[in-house]
Image: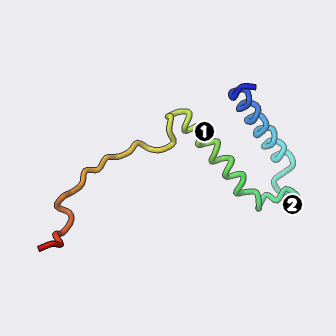
Amino acid sequence: MDNSATAVLVIENIFSLSQELISKGLSDPDLGIANSLNSLKLVQSGLRELLTAGNSGSSLPEKENIAPNQHFWPETAT
């Protein structure tokens, strides 16, 4: 199976598991939602990062070049 097909399968599994979680209800004490909230946020963050990287090629902002200010530092040698 190639990478593209594997990625589609993984995304379909994530979708299916998300639907199952919603259908069971978030108030089900057996699901431990309070303990799993970090994991859910991590998955959400990872998916957003994938979307951002896919659109721009990088999830980092453009590097800003700031020229040094030579007159900013006080002289320390006399």
**Dot 2 corresponds to which residue?**
29
Up/down of 22 relative to 8, above or below: below
Q: What residue sits 87% from the left and 48% below the top?
A: 24
Up/down of 14 relative to 30, above or below: above
Q: Nearer the viewer, mark 2 or mark 1?
A: 1
Q: What residue sits 71% from the left and 25% below the top?
A: 2
Q: Residue furthest front?
A: 77
Image position, residue 27 (x, y; %): 83, 57
Q: Which of the 4 image quarters holds residue 37?
A: bottom right
Q: Earlier in the sequence, mark 2 or mark 1?
A: 2
Circle 2 crowding by C-alpha within 10 Å: few under 14, some 14–19, many from 20 = few
Mark 2 element type: helix
Q: Is residue 26 left or right of residue 38?
A: right
**Dot label at residue 50:** 1
Look at label 1 and name its amino acid.
Leu
Mark 1 element type: helix
Circle 1 crowding by C-alpha within 10 Å: few under 14, some 14–19, many from 20 = some
Q: What residue sits 76% from the left and 31% below the top?
A: 9
**Dot label at residue 23:** none
The N terminus lies in quadrant: top right
Q: Is residue 54 left or right of residue 9?
A: left
Q: Is residue 70 left or right of residue 55?
A: left
Image position, residue 40 (x, y; %): 71, 51
Image position, residue 67 (x, y; %): 25, 50
Look at label 2 and name its amino acid.
Pro
